[in-house]
């Protein structure tokens, strides 16, 4: 770990830690919602898992910087759940 400068004061450290905790909670809720949309799309036969992978990989959807990469991370977190739902299928038949 590289040497980090200390916080400017204890109060600043407290505020930063509090804000990071709040941002983490917001991010977790948003992540859960994005995963729910992914699962819902597959379960409701809007698309299959391979379509979702393709969409995330093509990069043709305009999002703000880093969003598509984060969606790929979320996909990797739930990929096994998708496969379990699909009976272990990795690819379309």
Image: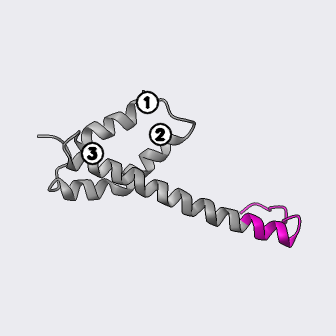
Mark 1: few/some/many CA within 10 Å (<14, 14-19, 20+) = few
In the rendered structure, which disc, 3 or 2, sits on the residue that comes first in sequence?
3
Kind of element beneath mark 2: helix
Q: Nearer the viewer, residue 53 or 39?
A: 39
The reply to whether the magenta stretch includes residue 67 is no
Mark 1 touches mark 3? (CB < 8 Å): no
Residue 76 rendering spot, x and y as whole percentages: 38, 52
* Residue at (51% x, 34% y) in the render: 63
Name the residue carrying label 2.
68
Checking the image for residue 61, the label placed there is 1
Kind of element beneath mark 3: helix
Kind of element beneath mark 1: loop
* Residue at (88% x, 68% y) in the render: 9
Name the residue carrying label 3.
41
In this rendering, would 18 be left or right of 56?
right
Residues shaded magenta: 1-16
């Amino acid at each position: 770990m590289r040497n980090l400068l200390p916080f400017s004061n204890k109060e600043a450290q407290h505020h930063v830690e509090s804000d990071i905790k709040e941002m983490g909670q917001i991010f977790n809720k948003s992540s859960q919602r994005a995963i729910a949309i992914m699962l819902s799309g597959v379960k409701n036969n809007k698309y299959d898992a391979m379509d979702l992978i393709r969409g995330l990989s093509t990069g043709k959807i305009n999002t703000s910087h880093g969003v598509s990469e984060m969606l790929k991370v979320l996909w990797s977190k739930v990929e096994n759940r998708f496969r379990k739902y699909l009976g272990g299928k990795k690819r379309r038949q």
